[in-house]
Amino acid sequence: MSFTLDPHLERECFTLGRLPLCHVLLMDNAAIPWLILVPETDVYELCDLEPAMHQRLFQEVHLLSRFTRRYFPTDKLNVAAIGNIVRQMHLHVISRRRDDYCWPGPVWGTTAPSRYDGAQVETLRLALASELAGAGFE
């Protein structure tokens, strides 16, 4: 299977690296820590994954979720598979705070008040690489 990232994700996100199954992306919204896992599969729905791939995907969600809580101030961690705009399978891992600009509402459909700069993206990529190196992050 040849993997191609959905153009919408490619436009809206930075690629931080890769775990054994998933590409790890950062949504370009510096006000909300928002990571996205995109598994290399042509399957669209979680329930259609083979059990081993489903298990691997959620192992990677677990790793990224724990990293997110350690790295960012977090009152509530949101993990979701909402694919109404982007059909390609992807899971969101979002660190929410009671004082974020759209709390308690959803982050979807809101305009980001600030964007990441290259240095911020690289700092986050290095932090992920350091913490997840043992999990195969590259």
Image (tube, grey):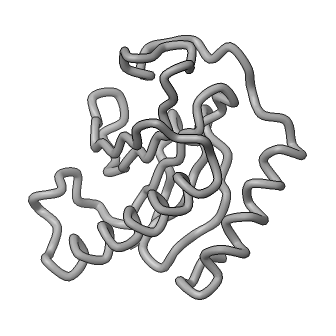
Say which residue appears at 13% left-offset and 77% top-offset.
Answer: 51
> Between residues 2 and 89, which one lies in front from this camera angle?
89
> Between residues 6 and 59, which one lies in front from this camera angle?
59
> Between residues 90 and 103, which one lies in front from this camera angle?
103
> Between residues 26 and 63, which one lies in front from this camera angle?
63
**Residue 54 in the image: x percent, y percent?**
21, 70
**Residue 95 in the image: x percent, y percent?**
50, 40
Q: Quadrant of residue 14?
A: top right
**Residue 111 in the image: x percent, y percent?**
57, 12
Q: Quadrant of residue 43?
A: bottom left
Q: Is residue 23 left or right of residue 85?
A: right
Q: Most extreme residue toward the bottom, as rendered? A: 134
Q: Is residue 135 left or right of residue 29?
A: left
Say which residue appears at 45% left-offset and 56% top-offset.
Answer: 37
Q: Most extreme residue toward the right, as rendered? A: 119
Say which residue appears at 31% left-offset and 77% top-offset.
Answer: 56
Is 73 located above or below residue 15 in the figure?
Answer: above
